[in-house]
Image (cartoon, rainbow, N blue to C red):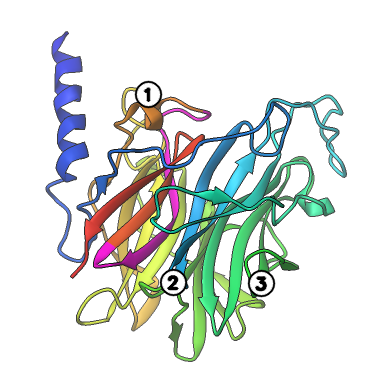
């Protein structure tokens, strides 16, 4: 083993065990991977809806069970790109959203009528529905997802609601232009939090946006000024969390992206980081972690559909622990935990 590879091995081992030493006090950075990972993998015969990839889940704990919405992707099919400008023989992977539940958060049972959110409308085809975020408010669940129409409208941030997680009402795109990653400001129980009488969302598609809403369906957005260096891009918002510490003044925004990883596979394509805003000025990011708190170190995170990639859309507090479910190499699902306080 040459000197460079030896140094990289030590670097990855340290990061995997204890995170990075420069994590600020406000961060949640001491996550430990579940030793039985991955907790969910693709299933089905080639060509069925989740036979290629099952990843990027949103998990919520209700009524004694963990409930998961996850992104399933079909096998290598050639689809006719409906309502798009792509060549008709262009190879496209179609994503849809399925439901699963678990009593222990480890062993999952899939809903027999999956997918519960299907790619069926013009702005959802042929790419499908991606990367759900899930919250619950007054007995109604809201799922924010990205609809993907390559060659046409591109990516559109959409919302749907449900009272049982099985039957969903779609409300369509919530912004007239390209947008994705609906990171709703929520508390540790996955309930949305109002600031100054408005719900809050952080969204991104190259540019970063700050959104506000009265009803979780209709949103007004404005551009954010962000302090991220160019070496962090591509960059996306994962989730936004508040009421997680004694002062209750912080907004912890999780991010996924290059984060100084560089383009080479010996580092990472996407890692996970954090930044900080305050309730008094929620659209302004005031502090940024210097290093990611999770990087792709495990074989199932380094090799998959998109190698060396971590991304997540879900964090919930359960039995005194934070449960972080994440997509590993855009192919399957892992779990990491840390103690709460």
Q: Quadrant of the C terminus?
A: bottom left
Which quadrant of the figure has residue 164?
Answer: bottom right
Query: What residue is drawn where x is 26% and y is 81%?
Result: 248
Give the alpha-carbon distance from disc 2 to disc 1, as whole Å: 36 Å
Q: Which mark's residue is nearer the viewer, 2 or 1?
A: 2
What mark, if any, has residue 264 been given in the picture? Answer: 1
Q: Earlier in the sequence, mark 3 or mark 2?
A: 3
Which residue has dot 2 on it? 190
Q: Nearer the viewer, residue 36 or 300?
A: 36
Image location (x, y in percent) of residue 154: 71, 48
**Vertical placement of 152 versus 23: above or below?**
above
Q: Is residue 174 above or below residue 227?
A: below
**Residue that lies at the very extreme toward the top in this rendered image:** 1
Q: Which residue is mark 3?
A: 162
Q: Magenta residues, as a range?
A: 305-321
Disc 2 + disc 1, Cβ < 8 Å: no
């Amino acid at each position: 083993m040459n000197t460079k590879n030896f140094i990289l091995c030590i670097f990855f081992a340290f990061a995997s065990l204890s995170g990075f030493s420069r994590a600020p006090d406000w961060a949640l950075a001491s996550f430990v991977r579940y030793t039985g990972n991955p907790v969910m993998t693709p299933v089905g015969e080639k060509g069925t809806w989740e036979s290629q990839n099952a990843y990027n889940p949103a998990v919520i704990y209700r009524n004694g069970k963990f409930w998961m919405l996850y992104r399933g992707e079909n096998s290598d099919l050639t689809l006719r790109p409906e309502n798009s400008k792509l060549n008709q023989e262009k190879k496209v992977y179609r994503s849809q959203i399925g439901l699963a539940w678990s009593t222990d958060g480890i062993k999952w049972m899939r809903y027999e009528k999956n997918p519960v959110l299907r790619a069926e409308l013009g702005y959802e085809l042929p790419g499908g529905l991606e990367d759900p975020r899930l919250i619950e408010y007054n007995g109604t669940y809201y799922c924010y997802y990205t609809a993907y129409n390559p060659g046409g409208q591109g990516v559109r941030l959409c919302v749907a609601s449900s009272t049982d997680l099985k039957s969903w009402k779609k409300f369509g795109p919530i912004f007239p232009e390209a947008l994705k990653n609906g990171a709703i400001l929520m508390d540790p129980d996955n309930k949305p939090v109002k600031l100054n009488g408005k719900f809050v969302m952080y969204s991104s598609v190259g540019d970063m946006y700050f959104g506000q809403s009265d009803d979780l369906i209709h949103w007004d957005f404005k551009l954010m000024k962000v302090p991220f260096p160019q070496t962090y891009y591509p960059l996306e918002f994962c989730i936004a969390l508040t009421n997680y510490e004694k002062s209750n003044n912080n907004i912890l925004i999780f991010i996924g992206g290059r984060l100084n990883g560089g383009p080479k596979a010996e580092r990472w394509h996407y890692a996970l980081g954090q930044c900080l805003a305050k309730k008094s000025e929620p659209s302004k990011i005031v502090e940024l972690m210097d290093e990611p708190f999770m990087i792709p170190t495990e074989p199932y995170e380094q090799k998959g559909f998109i190698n060396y990639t971590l991304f997540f859309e879900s964090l919930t507090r359960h039995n005194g622990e934070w449960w972080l479910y994440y997509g590993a190499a855009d192919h399957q699902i892992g779990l990491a935990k840390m103690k709460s306080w």
